[in-house]
Amino acid sequence: MKVWTPLAARATEMRPLARRPRRLRGLRVGVLDNSKPNADVLLHRVAALLAEQHGAASIRSWQKPGSSRPALMIEEIADQVDVVLTGSAD
């Protein structure tokens, strides 16, 4: 009999959280849409409010191919924006 364990084969590396900016004025905002229903609507509205109310300079968007799929564009996002909005919106 084979028994499968759901545990990872190796421990994942713990990393500290990224430093948070003190203000958004002039920063580039990224939106990572996880492809869940209405996620794009919610995230783009929040991004627009950040630009309007806090002076964020620009908004750039990416979309995952599906909510259960990995975001393979993380490095690209990190190179092109200063802060990122992502989340779920069922």
Image (cartoon, rainbow, N blue to C red):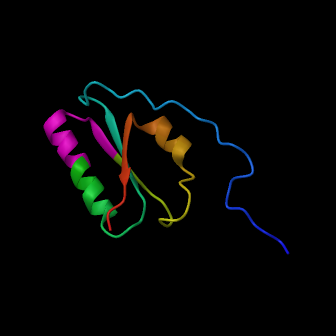
| Above-or-below relation of 2 to 61 | below
| Above-or-below relation of 85 to 70 | above
- Residue under the point 32% across and 61% down: 40
In screen coordinates, is 87 left or right of 47? right
Residue at the far bottom in the pictured view: 1
Tell me where residue 36 appears, x and y as whole percent: 39, 67
Magenta span: predominant SS is helix
Residue at the far left in the pictured view: 53
Of 26 and 6, the residue lying toward us: 6
> Which quadrant of the structure image shows residue 3?
bottom right
- Residue under the point 83% across and 71% down: 2
Please give the range of residues in magenta.
Answer: 47-59
Q: Is residue 51 magenta?
A: yes
Give the position of the C terminus as an image quadrant.
bottom left
In screen coordinates, is 27 left or right of 62? left
- Residue under the point 22% across and 54% down: 45
> Which quadrant of the structure image shows residue 29?
top left
Give the position of the N terminus as an image quadrant.
bottom right
Residue at the far top in the pictured view: 22
Tell me where residue 68 appears, x and y as whole percent: 52, 65
Tell me where residue 4 appears, x and y as whole percent: 75, 66
Tell me where residue 87 appears, x and y as whole percent: 37, 54
